[in-house]
Image (tube, rainbow, N blue to C red):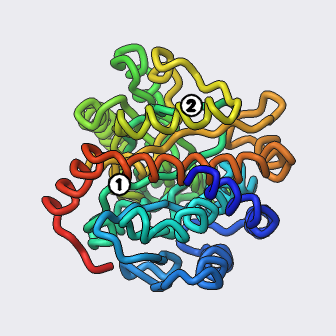
Amino acid sequence: MNSEVVGTVAAAASDLVALSHSIHAEPELAFEEHRSAAKVAELLAQSGFDVESPVAELPTAFSASYGSGDLVIGILAEYDALPEIGHACGHNIIAASAVGAGLALAPLADRLGITVRVLGTPAEESGGGKVLMLERGVFDGLGAAMMVHPGPEDIAGVASLAMADLAVVFSGREAHASAAPQLGRNAADAATIAQVGLGLLRQHLSAGQQMHGIVSDGGIAPNIVPARTEMHYYLRAQTSESLTDLTDRALACFEAGALAAGCTHEIRTVSPNYTELRPDPWLVRSYRELIVEMGRSPLAPALEGSRPLGSTDMGNVTHVLPGIHPVIGIESGGAATHQPAFAAACVTESADRAVTDGAVALAGTAIRAATDPEQRARLLEGAHRRGVGSR
């Protein structure tokens, strides 16, 4: 079957690369990926997949299924971009490789006794599309969920950090900054004091805890005491438990800023909390063996935990069902994700090879799971325990 997978992906390579490049050329932000989602779903529909769109009350989410086997294998496609710098996280590669894996598994579905389900998952960069889809039942009945993410090197068992995504609005009182500053309550001062508190807190953080953010609204004009200032902060930690501790301490800094400046403050959750990745060990081993056979050299298992990816809503999925989120390496000239140079690298020959290699590796991993009696039974048992859905 592996040779059939390679042949199917090779035959579809031009369409897969064209899809990757087309998504890259028209970057769309979270929950606005209408063109990108349609391009992915259309190629699947043309190949005989039954496409349901939208799903989970999300206009840019979809579910595309092929086959009728009792073991449902989920392949996840992401396609949202970053503000200003576009596909600097390579979601165009993720989407195209997911389609390639789906196309490769479809002709084998009956022999494998599987249903192939490609899920279009919006808003990974901000918004937590997978978390919402998980809560609304789209992942019900899946035995496993898999995807690949591009990066500067191959990593099979990727680590990530739990993350809280918060907006903090400080509210004060306008006044003329020169003629009557005593009448004002400076919301920008509240933000500054909060940032000083966060800065002093850094020396007391536990291993793996991180804080970083921006002032997204700093006021109207220099001669008006700002009555409103907004900060957007990410808090991260190695585990969800550690994130809770960090969040409590950061919230105290925000509160202190408001109190000291005579302002009020409001905290808004921008995205649902992302949990840390828990990649399935058996699926990771299978994926690693397959990419080694392709001539790739993944990071040694002992080093994987030292290279956290950042944070992803795929972490939430892996806390509920077996899943993997490996990084597939592309030549980026030393650039890392979320840099403009990495966005440029995501439509190179190396990136195109990652699309096809990723598709083959995901499909091969699914085949191994479906044909290994012990693993098949494990995945089926888990799916039934969570509830076999009809999506």
- Res. 170 visible in picture: no
- The residue carrying pointer 1 sits among few (fewer than 14), some (14 to 19) or many (20 or more) residues within 10 Å by Cα, namely many
Name the mark nearer the viewer: 1 or 2: 1
Amino acid type, residue under disc 1 in the picture: Ala
Task: Using the image, tell me which numbered label, if any, was put on residue 144.
Answer: 1
* Point 63% across, 74% down: residue: 40
* Point 36% across, 77% down: residue: 68
Which residue occupies the foreground of this view, 19 or 295? 295
Q: Give the secondary structure at mark 2.
A: loop
What's the distance in space between the residues labelled 1 and 2, CA to CA? Answer: 19 Å
* Point 65% across, 25% down: residue: 297
Q: Is residue 352 left or right of residue 189?
A: right
Which residue occupies the foreground of this view, 71 or 43? 71
Which residue has dot 2 on it? 155
Q: Is residue 136 left or right of residue 261?
A: left
Q: Is residue 16 left or right of residue 30?
A: right
- The residue carrying pointer 2 sits among few (fewer than 14), some (14 to 19) or many (20 or more) residues within 10 Å by Cα, namely many
Q: Is residue 189 left or right of residue 43?
A: left
- Res. 61 visible in picture: yes
Which residue occupies the foreground of this view, 146 or 8? 8
Quadrant where the image shows the C terminus: bottom left
Q: Give the secondary structure at mark 1.
A: strand
Amino acid type, residue under disc 2 in the picture: Ile
Q: Quadrant of residue 245?
A: top left
Question: Which one is earlier in the sequence, the residue at label 1 or at label 2?
Answer: 1
Q: Position of residue 33 (x, y in %)?
A: 61, 73
In the figure, 340 relative to 124: above or below? above
Q: Position of residue 50 (x, y in %)?
A: 48, 85
